[in-house]
Each structure stands twice: as structure tokens, then as C-alpha cells.
Amino acid sequence: MLTYPQIDPVAVHLGPLAVHWYGLMYLVGFFAAWGVLNLRLRVSPRGFTAEQLSDMLFYAALGIIVGGRLGYMLFYAWPDLWANPLLIVQVWKGGMSFHGGLLGVIIALSLYAHKIGKSLVDLTDFIAPAVPLGLAAGRIGNFINGELWGRVTDVPWAMVFPNAGSLPRHPSQLYEFLLEGVLLFIILWTYSRKIRPRWAVSGLFLVGYGLFRFVIEFFREPDLQIGYLAFGWFTEGQLLSLPMIVLGVAMMTWAYWSPKKCSNI
């Protein structure tokens, strides 16, 4: 068994302001994505300018924060939100939903795509390879916060999390860091280095994330207030991931089999 590193969730105090590691991880993810997309822009602009890239990331960041928090409170903590609406702004305590953030980003980028006269899928195809970097940083934030731990296990790398009782558990945050973050980034970056049909890169992201998240849910403890939805193993995370897989497969099928196949810009 490994020892869980007790890391103070507050990285630094700036007077009365406490800067949390969780928030810093979002900044790390944002700047990592910004760096990768700038490299992508220099190698293959695909019809975008540096200014448009900055605007895209700004809109995406707003979508992540607003959608991620709203999604978490609506999907996982509706009773708590009903009892205390101010919880919606307490993001430093953790509690962000990827699926809510994804919906937020889609809405935000839809508005920006309309503004610049481009198709939404052209934007998502361009930024999708960088998204796993943000996911990876966010999972490290979850690990530091000691939240979203895994199920009880006896594997040699199990850890006892401070707020999860005395039994050793899967460090599922690190599984998500490796699969949804590192591995998914490698897959998407490698795949997108060549010009692909429109919809294909976005579709691969949806399939990849959906599959990895579905598998990791077998090792991750379901939220206490929700538990298992069916069969003693099916979780809310798996329920939300299934539509991603189906939609991603449909998008890739359309990309490669449509009689009007169109290469990405």
C-alpha cells in the first residue's frame, strides 16, 4: 500500500486570499492547452488566426467554469444546491462536472462560431487534441483535494484517503489522469497531425473520453448521494458517458462515410 501524500489544498496565502491548488490546476491546464494549440496553429493554421485562438480559449474557459459547476450541482448535488444556493460559487472546494463543462464549452463555442462565421465543428476539431491536458491537470487537483477517490481494494498501490475512512482505495484520480489525460492526448495529437475529415477529431475525442471514463468508473467510488443506478455497478458517470460514445461513433461514421466528405479547414 502507498501512503497518500498529505498536501495542503491551499498552495499559498496572499494576505486574506487563499490560493488553492485546485484552482491553480485549472490555470495549468489552460496554459498547457494554450501552448499546444499555438504550436498546432503554427504547424497548420486551418483557417484560424492567433487572435481567434485566444478568443476561442476565453469562451471555452467560461464554458468550463460555468457549465462544469452547474453540471456538478445539477447532476450530482441537487439537494445540496436546493438547501444552499450559494454553493454554486464555492468552486474552490471542488465539485466540477466534466459532462457539464463539456456542454458549457459547446454552448460557448457555438456563440463564438456564429460570431466569426464558422462551423462549430471546425472549432471543436481544432481544439479537441488539447482538451486532455486540461483534464489531466484537473485530476491532479482532485487528487490533491483528496476527493473522487476509488473503491476499496487490496492492490499494492492502494491509498487511504483522509476523508474516505480507514480502508485502502484505488487512486482513481490518477487513473483518470493517465487515461483521460495523458493517453487521450497522445491519441488525439497523433491522429490530428494529418488533415482528417470534418467531425472526425471531435468524434474521436468523444469516443475516447467516453470509453476511458466508462472503464474507470468500475474503479471509482460512486457519489455517496447517488450510489449505483442499476445492476450494483452502473454509475451516473457511466450513464453520462454512454451518449458521448454513441455520438462520437456517429460523428466518425459520418466523417468517413458521408458522400460529401469534407476535409477540416
Image (spheres, rainbow, N blue to C red):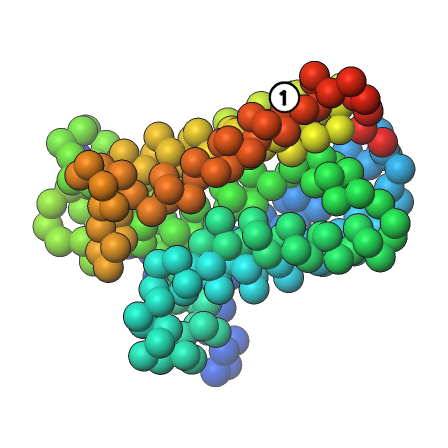
As drawn, 40 above or below 4: above
- Quadrant holding the N terminus: top left
Local secondary structure at mark 1: helix
**Label 1 sits on residue:** 253
The extreme front residue here reads: 259
Q: Position of residue 42 (x, y in %)?
A: 85, 34
Q: Is 97 situated left or right of 143 in this image?
A: right
Q: Quadrant of residue 220?
A: top left
Residue 17 in view (yes/no): yes
The residue under the point 67% across, 24% down is 254
Q: Position of residue 112 (x, y in %)?
A: 78, 55
Q: Quadrant of residue 80?
A: bottom left
The residue under the point 66% across, 43% down is 33
The residue under the point 10% across, 50% down is 166
Q: Is 31 situated left or right of 146 in this image?
A: right
Residue 36 in view (yes/no): no
As drawn, 93 above or below 248: below
Q: Quadrant of residue 3?
A: top left
Q: How many marks?
A: 1
Q: Position of residue 153 (x, y in %)?
A: 15, 35
The extreme left residue here reads: 166
As drawn, 87 above or below 257: below
The extreme bottom residue here reads: 16
Q: Nearer the viewer, residue 23 or 114?
A: 114
* Amino acid on which the number 1 mark rests in the picture: Thr
Q: Is 3 situated left or right of 143 in this image?
A: left
The residue under the point 80% across, 43% down is 119
- Quadrant holding the C terminus: top right
